[in-house]
Image (spheres, rainbow, N blue to C red):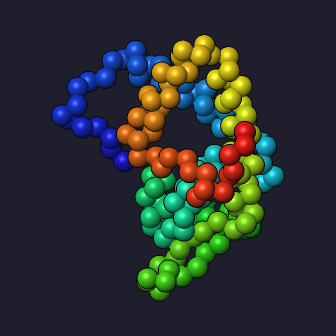
Amino acid sequence: MTLSNPAQPEVDDALVGAFLTASRALVGVAARSLAAGTSDITLSQHRALVLLASRGPQRMADLASLLGVNSSTATRHCDRLQRRGLLQRDRSPDDGRAVRVSLTDAGHRLVQQVTQARRAEISQILRAMPDRSRQHLIAALHSFAEAAGEVPEQHWTLGWGTES
């Protein structure tokens, strides 16, 4: 997915560098949070589960597109996740030829476990920041996620609850 827009001004290298550094920290948090889950999955497989949790059942081709991979790669991810009992495949009600994937209850529980671990570690990191910095960060991160096409966290959709 290309996110550049020629009509937008260039971005300062210091800002890009700051996001690269922050993204390395967040990848570390993500990797550690996977260890909190009860299933041995990769970060890419977890991303597929999160996309299904946040967007609902998807046709295999659509999931591949959301993941930014080809259909055969998405199918391999889903094969592994299905063997672990984390997702299921069904024929699409709209197109009997298309395969639709969705989370199982175990898949929902795993996403919830990993998310709770990630939330706890991020909360700890944010508590170490000055309050003023945290307040400015909220709007900036919402704008960043929206520009990247990320679906906002919706507790009622994901079933994750509101407790931290």
In the picture, measured across the screen, residue 96 lies left or right of residue 34, that is left
Q: Nearer the viewer, residue 23 or 40?
A: 23
The residue lying at 81 percent from left, 52 percent from top is 38
Q: Quadrant of residue 84?
A: bottom right
Q: Nearer the viewer, residue 77 or 10?
A: 10
Residue 30 location in percent, x, y?
A: 65, 38
Q: Quadrant of residue 54?
A: bottom right
The residue lying at 58 percent from left, 79 percent from top is 90
The residue lying at 18 percent from left, 34 percent from top is 7
In the picture, measured across the screen, residue 148 lies left or right of residue 81, that is left
Q: Is residue 164 visible?
A: yes
- Vertical position of residue 72 compared to residue 147: above or below: below
Residue farthest to the bottom, as pictured = 96
* Quarter of the C terminus within the rendering: top right
Residue 35 location in percent, x, y?
A: 77, 42
- Vertical position of residue 43 compared to residue 78: above or below: above
In the picture, measured across the screen, residue 19 lies left or right of residue 130, that is left
Q: Nearer the viewer, residue 135 or 51?
A: 135
Residue farthest to the right, as pictured = 38
Residue 22 location in percent, x, y?
A: 54, 24
Q: Is residue 80 visible?
A: no
In the picture, measured across the screen, residue 19 lies left or right of residue 83, that is left
